[in-house]
Image: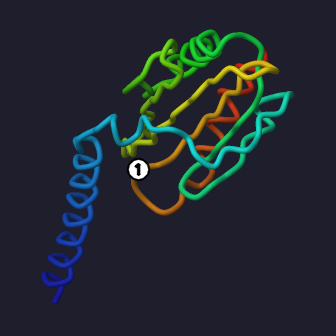
Amino acid sequence: MNYVFKAIFYGSIFTIFFGFLAVAVFVRLAPNDPTLWNVAIEGGTPAIPGPCAEQVRSVVKGALATCLLRGTPEQVLARLNAIVLATARTHSVAGQADQGRMTWLARTLIMGFPDYITAEATQTGDGTKLAVYSRQRYGRGDWGVNAARLTSWLATLDRE
C-alpha cells in the first residue's frame, strides 16, 4: 500500500511540475503579431488637464488612462517610451513616437505572461491628448497589475 501512495504522490508532483513548465514554455514562445495589438484605442475618456497618474481606471482585462499634457505628440511619446523601456522585461513591439502610436510588451517575472501596452498621442487645441491602454493577453483578471503599471509610468511622466 505504501508503494501505491508514493507512486500517486510522485506522479502528481511530476504532472504538476511538467504542466507548469508546459504552460510557461507556451506563454513565452507564443507568436507575437503586432498588428493585433498596435491598434487604435477606443473607449477613452475625454482628456483633462492634471496628473496623468490620477486618470488611470481599470477596464476589462486591463487599465486605461487618458490625459492632457504639454508638448507635441512626438515629444510626449518619446518621453513615455524612455520610461517604458527602463522597465524590466519590457520592450517595444510596434510603432514609433513620430507615428503617434506605440505598443510595448511587458512580461511577468516568473511565468512570462505577456501584457500589451499601447499609447496614442494626438494634438488638441489645449495640448497633447495621451491615451494609454494596458491589457493582458491570457486569463480573465490581472489582479490590478496593468493599472499599477500605468500609474507608475504616468506618475514618472507627470514628474518630468
Above or below, comparing residue 29 to residue 103 in the picture: below
Q: Residue furthest right?
A: 50
Q: How many marks?
A: 1
Classify the position of the C terminus by image quarter: top right
Q: Position of residue 82 (x, y in %)?
A: 55, 13
* 88 sits left or right of 5 in the view: right
As rendered, which of 64 and 152 lies closer to the eye? 64
* 113 sits left or right of 30 in the view: right
10 Å crowding of disc 1: few (<14), some (14-19), many (20+): some
* 71 sits left or right of 84 in the view: right
Please give the name of the residue rendered at 76% of the width and 33% of the height, measured from the top-left corner: 53
Determine the image quadrant of residue 17.
Answer: bottom left
Secondary element at image label 1 = loop
Classify the position of the N terminus by image quarter: bottom left
Q: How is the image coloured?
A: rainbow
Q: Position of residue 143 (x, y in %)?
A: 59, 55
Q: Residue furthest front?
A: 125
As rendered, which of 85 and 22 lies closer to the eye? 85
Please give the name of the residue rendered at 28% of the width and 38% of the height, measured from the top-left corner: 32
Please give the name of the residue rendered at 21% of the width and 54% of the height, measured from the top-left corner: 22
Q: Which residue is mark 1?
A: 137
Q: Position of residue 56 (x, y in %)?
A: 72, 41
Q: Position of residue 71 (x, y in %)?
A: 72, 10
* 160 sits left or right of 2 in the view: right
Q: Residue furthest bottom?
A: 1
Above or below, comparing residue 152 to residue 29 in the picture: above
Q: Amino acid at mark 1?
A: Arg
Please give the name of the residue rendered at 51% of the width and 25% of the height, measured from the top-left corner: 101
